[in-house]
Amino acid sequence: MSDLTQVPAVSSRKHGAVTIVTLSRPDARNAVDSDTARALYAAFIAFEEDTHAKVAVFHGAHGHFCAGWDLKAGARMAREEGGPGVLTDQDFSPLRPAELEASPTQAPLGPMGPSRLLLSKPVIAAVSGAAVAGGMELALWCDMRVMEEDAYFGVFCRRFGVPLIDGGTVRLPRLVGMGHAMDLILTGRKVGAAEALAMGLANRVVPKGEAIDAALLLAEQLAQFPQATMNADRMSAYQQWDLPLHDALYQEWLRGKACIGLGLEGAGRFADGQGRHGAFGA
C-alpha cells in the first residue's frame, strides 16, 4: 500500500492564526465524493468555531486544486444507491443572509461540501493545476483566489450534462459580470491564469508551485489587521447583494458603527506616526 493512500482526503493544520485546509485525493485529481464533501464541510465548520483562527487557506495537494465532483463516484451512486434522488432529495432549506450570519454553521451541506456556508472569516484559495466544474465552484466560494500561472478554471462539467449546483451560476456572475459568466457557463471552455486575472476571477497570479506560499503570506497580512472591522466590512459586502441601496447603506452603517471605537484607536496610532504614506508596518 502506497504512502498516498494513508493520507486523509481532507486535513487541517495551523500556521499561527491561519488554518490550512488541504484536499488530497491524488487518484482523482482531488475530485470530491460524498465522504470528502462531508469532510470539507466539517473542516470549515471547525475553522469557523476556532476562536484563534483568523483566516483559512484552502488548497489541493499533488498539483491540482480540485477536478470537481467525482463523476466515477456519481456513476456508482446512480447504479447502486438509487440514482439522482440521492442528491435531489437532500435537505436544502435555504437560509437568508441574516440567518446565515447569525448562525453560519447551520447552512446545509452542499454536494461539494462547504459551498452553502457563509463564514464570518475569510478563506483564500491557493489554486494550482485544475480548478474545474465543482472545483471552480469551491474556488468561487472562497473570498480570494491566488492562482499559479499554469493553473486553469473551466465549467468542464458542461461536456457531461452535470449542472452547477454549488453556487457557480450565482457567484460567477457576481464576481466577473454576466458577459464573462455566460461565456464560461455556456461554453465550458478552459480559462488560464492570465485571462482569469484580467476578468477578475483570480486576484493574484504567481509562478508554478508558489500558490500556497503566496496565499499564506496574504492570509498572514489579513490576520494582522483589526479583525472586527475587517470582518464587519467583509460581511457588509456580502450582505448588500439582495438589499435596496438605502437598506444596504444602513446595514453598512450598523456594522461600521460597532467598530468606531477601534477606528478611533487606529486614528490615534496614525497621529502618533504609524502607517504614514500607506505603510502597513509600525
Image (cartoon, helix red, strand yellow):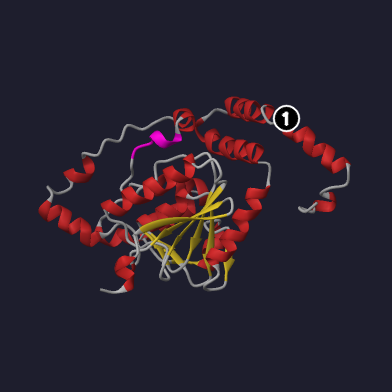
Neighbour class for label 1 at 10 Å: few (<14), some, many (≥20)? few
Q: Does residue 194 show up magenta in the picture?
A: no
Residue drawn at (69%, 31%) of the image: 259
Residue plotted at (31% across, 54% down):
36
- x, y percent for residue 150: 49, 72
Asked if residue 112 can be seen in this view, the reply is no
Question: Residue drawn at (32%, 51%), measured in percent from left and top?
Answer: 37
The residue singled out by tag 1 in the image is 260
* Towards the viewer: 112 or 153: 112
Quadrant that contains the N terminus:
bottom left
Residue 71's x, y, as percent?
Answer: 24, 60
Q: Main secondary structure of the magenta part?
A: helix
User: Where is residue 98 drawn, in percent x and y?
Assistant: 48, 28
Q: Nearer the viewer, residue 280 or 138?
A: 280
Element type where label 1 sits in the image: helix
In the image, the segment drawn in magenta is 104-108
**Residue 237 horizontal side relative to residue 139, left or right:** right
Question: For the point 40% across and 52% down, which residue is it?
Answer: 137
Q: Horizontal placement of 187 versus 177: left or right?
A: left
In the image, taking residue 275 as reference, residue 208 lies left or right, namely: left
Quadrant assignment, res 46: top left
Residue 72 percent location from the top left of the image: 21, 62
Which of the 4 quarters of the picture holds residue 61?
bottom left
- Farthest residue to the right: give it: 272
Q: Can residue 15 be seen from the camera position used here?
A: yes
Which three-letter amino acid code belongs to the residue tagged 1? Ile
Number of marks present in the image shown? 1
Residue 242 horizontal side relative to residue 160, left or right:
right
